[in-house]
Image (cartoon, helix red, strand yellow):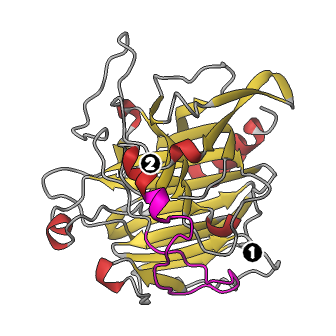
């Protein structure tokens, strides 16, 4: 991969500092088949939209993968069959049943109807989710929601505790054009979830499932990143809007935050226990029709020691510190479940996310 080594050296310098980094996972997809010792494809439709391996035009000995959502993806995708390593590999039991998960709560979109402003906004109805679409979604006998999902997740031995700092880096590309750029249709391309969390949430919010505490999103075809302090979600980085303008990002308490509490779906601002420090030029480049490299150094924590550091290529976008994630389950340490691919509200179009490589690193002596 022609850019892997420079990024690795840069990531090592920026993120590892006085400690050494080691690869937990590295996959440049040179083989024309999925490495099942690292990846679980239980939420990939292997029949209709399997992962596509295509030759890398920059390296004839290499491949890129394509993860596609299409009409056949309507209704979501349960983790079926459950994640299972090849029989020749042993499985480390972390006490986390990651194969059984409720659909993540997408929550609201930060983009207004014109996609020119950021701020609290009421949940909006997906214009494509009419009665006929809902009927097809239910008939799929999957998640039973008017959504599309095609995601990879890590196999169990690579799932780490949420308070362990990890560096996630990947190079990806999105379609140059998308069907809808005006209705703020929610679209996740990478997510970090905590499991398990405190059972108090299930008692307080029936039929609710936690959102990712960190998510890379593509609503309206605009790359952006959200982070959560409990039930307060903030957008902390974004590519320019469709008119070329960008939000003004100021260091301090995140500016654009909204409650995701179900009873406050009408659009209510919230103040997180977070601080953000922006780089000199904190504007993301769009992945629409072009490759971008993203790096996230992640450690969730409710003690105030959590952090997320975001780079695009060699550019520091933002560093967020404070209370990140949900209240933990007192009976079990929370684990971070990383997923990459596409999870969105229904759009009647076929769209492919290309991925060149993925690297996940731990810090250690």
Q: Secondary structure at mark 1?
A: loop
Which residue of the protein is positioned furthest toward the top in this rendering? 88
What distance separates the C-alpha of mark 1 from that of mark 2?
39 Å
Residue that numbered label 2 is attached to? 76
Secondary structure of residue under mark 2 = loop
Which residue position holds label 1?
A: 280
Figure label count:
2
State whether residue 165 is above or below residue 365: below
Q: Which residues are magenta?
A: 107-134
Closest to the observer: 303 or 287?
Answer: 287
Q: Residue at x 23, y 61 (%)?
A: 328
Q: Quadrant of the N terminus?
A: top right
Asked whether residue 28 is in view, the answer is no
Q: Is residue 63 left or right of residue 76?
A: right
Residue at image position (35%, 24%) is 84
Magenta-span inclusion, residue 287: no
Spot occupied by residue 222 in the image (x, y as percentages of width and height): 69, 67
Q: Quadrant of residue 330?
A: bottom left
Magenta part mainly helix, strand or loop? loop
Does 123 appear in magenta?
yes
Q: Specify which label sits upstream in the sequence, 1 or 2.
A: 2
Does residue 116 lie above or below 63 as drawn? below
């Amino acid at each position: 991969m022609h850019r892997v080594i420079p990024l690795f050296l840069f990531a090592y310098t920026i993120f590892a500092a006085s400690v050494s980094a080691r690869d937990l996972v590295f996959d440049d997809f040179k083989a024309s088949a999925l490495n099942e010792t690292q990846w679980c494809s239980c939420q990939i439709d292997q029949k209709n939209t399997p992962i596509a391996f295509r030759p890398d035009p920059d390296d004839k000995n290499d491949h890129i993968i394509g993860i596609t959502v299409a009409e056949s993806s309507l209704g979501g995708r349960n983790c079926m069959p459950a994640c299972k390593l090849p029989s020749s590999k042993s499985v480390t039991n972390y006490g986390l049943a990651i194969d059984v998960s409720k659909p993540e709560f997408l929550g609201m979109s930060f983009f207004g109807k014109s996609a020119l402003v950021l701020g609290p906004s009421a949940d909006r109805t997906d214009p494509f989710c009419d009665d006929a679409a809902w009927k097809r979604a239910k008939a799929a006998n999957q998640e039973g929601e008017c959504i599309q999902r095609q995601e990879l997740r890590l196999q169990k031995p690579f799932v780490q505790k949420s308070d362990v700092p990890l560096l996630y880096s990947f190079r990806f590309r999105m379609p140059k054009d998308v069907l809808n750029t005006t209705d703020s249709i929610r679209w996740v391309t990478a997510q970090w979830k905590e499991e398990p969390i405190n059972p108090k949430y299930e008692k307080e919010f029936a039929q609710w499932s936690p959102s990712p505490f960190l998510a890379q999103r593509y609503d309206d075809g605009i790359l952006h990143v959200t982070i959560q302090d409990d039930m307060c979600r903030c957008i902390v980085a974004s590519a320019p809007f469709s008119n070329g303008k960008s939000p003004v990002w100021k260091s301090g308490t995140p500016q654009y935050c909204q409650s995701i509490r179900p009873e406050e779906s009408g659009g209510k601002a919230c103040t997180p226990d977070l601080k953000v420090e922006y780089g000199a030029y904190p504007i993301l480049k769009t992945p629409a029709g072009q490759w971008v490299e993203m790096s996230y150094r992640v450690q969730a924590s409710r003690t105030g020691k959590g952090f997320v550091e975001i780079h695009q290529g060699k550019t520091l976008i933002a560093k967020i510190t404070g209370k990140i994630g949900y209240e933990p389950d007192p009976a079990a340490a929370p684990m971070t479940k990383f997923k990459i691919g596409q999870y969105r509200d229904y759009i009647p179009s076929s769209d492919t996310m290309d991925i060149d490589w993925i690297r996940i690193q731990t810090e250690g002596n």
